[in-house]
Structure formats: C-alpha cells, structure tokens
Image (cartoon, rainbow, N blue to C red):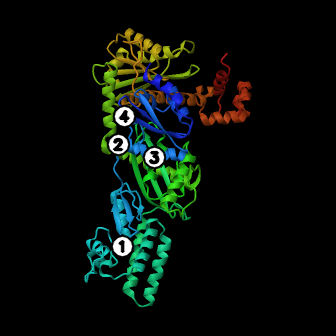
Amino acid sequence: MDALADIQEALHTVPLVPGVYLWKDATGEVLYVGKAKELRKRMQQYLAGADERAMIPLMMARVASFDYVVCASEVEALILELNLIKQFSPPYNVDLRDDKTYPFIALTCADAFPAIKYTREKHKAGTRYFGPYTDARAARETMDALRRVVPLCRSTCPDYKRVLRGGKALSRACFDAHIGLGPGVCTSDISEQDYAVGVRRALRFLAGHYRELEDELHAAMEAAASELEFETAARYRNRLDAIARVKEKQSIVSEEHVDLDVIGVARAETLACAYVLAVRAGRVQYGNEYILETGADDLLSTFVARYYSEAAEVVREVLLEEIPEDSAVLSEYLTGLRRERSDGRLCGRVQLSAPRIGRKKRLVQMAGENARHALLRYKARTHYDDERTNTALLELESALALPGPPLRIECCDISTLHGAHSVGSLVVFTNGRADKAGYRRFKIQLPHAESNDLAMMREVLARRFSCERREDARFGRMPDLLIIDGGKPQLSATLAQLAELGITDIPVAGLAKSEEELWVSWQETPVILPDGSPSLYLVKRVRDEAHRFAIDYHRQLRAKAATTSVLDEVVGIGPKRRRELIAAFGNFRKLREASVDEIEAAVPFVTPAMAADIFSVLHPD
C-alpha cells in the first residue's frame, strides 16, 4: 500500500473539529500548514483531488505523513497556523520573498521622558509602534518630519540615556536641543508634564490626525504672539509649516476623517505582490509593498493574517479586492488584535469589505495598480522573467528530448463558428518571448462542407510550411518546436501533413487543454510537466496567445460580414447612399420588391444603369 493509501486509512481517526494540520514528506519535513473548521473533511479534500489550486498535486506527490493539532475555535486555529508557519517556514505556504524584519517608528511611552526611535525590534510592553514600513528611507523621513513638528529626544542620544539613568542635568544642551529638534531634557529645560504634551502631539502626528495638532499649535502660536514672545511664536509657525509640507505629499481621498487600510494584490505565475495603502484621517499617509512567494493556500487571506500579526496598528476597516472565504474568522482574529494593541480601549469589530462602486472602489483599484507596478519593478530589478524563461527552455529541452533549447517556438490554432468565418493563427515565441513580427493569420479556404478542425489545421500547416514559405525570409527560419493545440489526434494529423511536405526534422508536441498534457510522437503516454513549473507556464502562454490571436481575427471577419450588404457590389453605392436608398423605400424588403423604374425614381442619384445593377443584385435568379 502506497503512502497516500496509508494516509487515507489514517484519516478516519482524525476528528471533525477545528484545528491545524501539517503535511510532511518522507523525511519528516513540514511541507504545508493549514487550518480547518473540520479537520478530517478538509484533509480528505486533498486526497480526493477536490482542491483545484495548482500547487496541490505537486505537494501531495511528496506527502508521506501528516500531523494535526485540535483547537477550541477557528480563531485559535488561525493563530496557531500563523505561529507554525513562522516556526517551520513550509515551502508550500505563502511567504514573504524578502523575509527580513521591517522597520517601525516607536515611542518608549513607559519611560518618564519617552524617546522616539527607528527600530526593527519585536513589540515590547510600554512602547507604541507605528508601521511597518517597507521603505526604510520613508520611515526615517517620517521620523525627521515629526521631530521638526514636535521636538523629542532620540533613544540613541547619549545625553538622554544618561539623564534617564538618573544622571545630573548638563549645563550645556545636546546638539539636537541646540538645533531645535530636542526639547532640552538633558539640561532640565522641560518638565515631565510639558514633555508629555509633546508625546501626545507626536502620537496624533504619527496616527495621521493633523487637524487637532494644527489647532493646538495655532492656538499656542497666537498665545505666544499676544504675549509678545515672537521667537516662540515663530517656532510654532515653523512647526505648522512642517505639517503643511507633510500634508502636501499625501493625497486626500475623503473629506471625512476616516482611518482604513486598503490592500491590493498583483499575481505573476509563482510570484505576487501585496500593496497596503494606509489612509489616516482621510489622507493616504503611506504605502507599503510586499513581494510574496505564492503557495498552496489562499494568498489574500494568508497575507492579511500575516501582515496584521506584525503590524503595530489594526484599523477598524480593511478594503480588499474580494472577500476571503474565511472572512468571519479573519475579522474575529483582527478584532482581537485591535483590542490587544489598544489595551482594550478599541473594541469595535474589524470590518473586511470589497467595495464595488464609489471612492472606496477607486482606492482598491489604486492599491491594485500600485501592486502591479511594484511587482514589475521587482521583476525588472531581479531579472525574474529572464531566469524563469531560461529555466523554462532548459526544462522543455529535457522533458521533450529536444536536440537543444527551443529558442524559436511556433504554435497553430483554429477558430471557427459552425464552420463559418474559419481562420487559423500562427504565433512565434523567440527566446521565450512573444515575437509579434512573426505572427501570421490564415483565412481558411476549404469549402464549408469539408471543413473540420483537423482538415483546417492541415491547410494551415500546408500553407505555412509550403516550399515558397520555407524560403520566404518574412516567415523566418524553421521552428525548434511546433506546438499544436490538441491531443493525440491533432498530433497525428500534423505529423502526417508535415510528412507529405517532406518535413521530418521539426519536433512537434500537442498540448491537450483538459489536463495540460504534452503529446509527442515517440511515446504512447503524454509528457506531464510539473504544476507551477516555468516550462508549463511557457507552453500554456504560447497556446493561449495562439488562441487569442485566432479569435481576434475570427471576430474581425464576423464583424465585417455583419456590416456587409449585397448593395456594396453595385458600383457607385457606398454606405451613405445605401442608407438613403433603403430610407426612400422604408425597409429592405420593399426595396427588393420594387421594379427598375421605381428604384430609378426613388432617389435622385440613381441612374438607369445603376437601377438595373441594383435590381440584378437583388434578384440574382
């Protein structure tokens, strides 16, 4: 009995309760961690093939055993799943491509004089964190802008550390205090109460609530001016200007002071990017991008849970492109995190929504567009596409036993509708990329009664590989691999047609749509490319491009036929005159019933010869 049969037998002992399951390979390595409302049912879906995600068959081929942990609720299962993923880093779970820790801005609120710091540390009690930021420069710029608005001590300042440990005040201010970025703790120029006012202002600034902070600073400026303390008033004015400069860089998305996060996702084969827009007080405060390795689990749901397990703040509303299946469990989990991060003060339930219209819908589209561009930047920076393409060509060379990498791949496809307007397409991929200059399309010339997919494919091949075309530089050189859309029958017909043309040295493969199998001539069973492999993505992309190109041409011919009239055959009758002629009789049927004299008399531009031509076209018998 094989491993999967043993697993199937062992699953009968798994309970129907919430929990977490772990699939393992023969060495005991954890391949995948998942959660379930009913463990046994969820695990049986993997063995029954009911899960259609691309990574599942590849993963299950490696599974040799499993383990599971029973939990009291789905929320507990979600928390345990996240912890186990961090512990084992399973290869088939969604994971961050760059698994470093991300920076935060933090305020050490438990200290008598809380300091601000740039940090990548884990959350500590008594410290308020803001972030994470994926751009370290943006985090430092935000911290610098804050200190221009609200002078605060840096946690790295040696004079601040000495005072915090109980040292005596200095007679001379530190450099930060000297240039106005520090409040003067080192020289005892500020009390704990006054410093606490600055900390509250800093918290509002970092939360994006600028209006209250502006009102306070404006009132302080006017009070100082009324007391003739113009230097103090000028400092408050400069701080207000610093806030204005920060706000200029932030887009206004709502006149309401709403706080929400917007998450957009872009996917590319085995890679994805999630982009988080943080909207605070109606303004886009910052955006963070995360490159992900797509796995066998739900990418969006997994990212949301992973992101907020690390984030310093959980907002009341999260906008998504679509609602995850486990949205209720996810919402409950985020609500617990929100309550925990706010010391129980914020008890409102976190809402996950996927807006369909209005401003929020546009925000989701903005996040998705930013995710797409971030993914393109990452792929360009890391040469991801080049590496995938090179790997795909080498995999095809090995899997199909080719004499070399298929640097030129051609693919043919047929598009028809009940035998009408039948067309064929030929697309070319050079070095793994679409070479549109080499694309060709063919209008099928077979009589309607003789046309079928195999016969039409033979016609396309005969025209593409005829002696004239083989010597035509516009068609390029012969392909290293010819892909036919279809299975074994289409492959046999193609090989027969090529043999008639005297061509026996072109490798041919038929790509069946149902199971994505590659049929070749030298073996009875198809070649199965691994799910998720670069080679499978490449051949599917080639096949889909040939299909798209054929359908586009087919639609063009159908549209042209729909707008063609028998009157177009009459010399001197264009679209405008055709409309006038039909309008003169009221409809086409009355025009057809009219005599030559009636047609001549109906419209001034119709001559006797033209009227006779119109009548003969309308009455071909």
Tell me which label, 3 or 2, sits earlier in the chain.
3
**Viewer-side residue, 555 vs 228:** 228
Label annotation for residue 246: none
Cα distance in 3D space between marks 4 and 1: 49 Å
User: Around disc 1, counting alpha carbons within 10 Å, would you say few (fewer than 14), some (14 to 19), or many (20 or more)?
Assistant: many
Question: Which quarter of the figure is the N terminus placed in?
Answer: top left
The mark lying in front, picked from 3 and 2, is: 3
Residue that carries the numbered disc 2 in the rendered image: 379
Three-letter residue code for mark 3? Phe
Mark 2: amino acid: Lys
Q: How many marks?
A: 4
Q: Nearer the viewer, mark 4 or mark 1?
A: 4
SS under mark 1: loop
Pointer 3 or 1: first along the chain: 1
Q: Position of residue 584 (x, y in %)?
A: 71, 35
The residue that mark 3 highlights is 303
Question: In the image, is residue 58 above or below residue 34?
Answer: above
What separation in Å lies between label 2 and label 1 (alpha carbons)? Answer: 40 Å
* Secondary structure found at label 4: loop
Q: Which residue is mark 4?
A: 29
Q: Determine whether, in the image, residue 302 is placed left or right of residue 588.
A: left
Most extreme residue toward the front is 13
Residue with the mark numbered 1: 152
Disc nearer the start of the sequence (2/1): 1
Q: CA distance from mark 4 to mark 2?
A: 30 Å
N-terminal of the pair, mark 4 or mark 2, is 4
Q: CA separation, marks 3 and 2?
A: 20 Å
Q: Position of residue 72 (x, y in %)?
A: 54, 45
State how far apart marks 3 and 1 are (Cα): 34 Å
Q: Determine whether the residue tagged by mark 2 lies in a helix, strand or loop.
A: helix
Give residue 585's quadrant in the image. top right
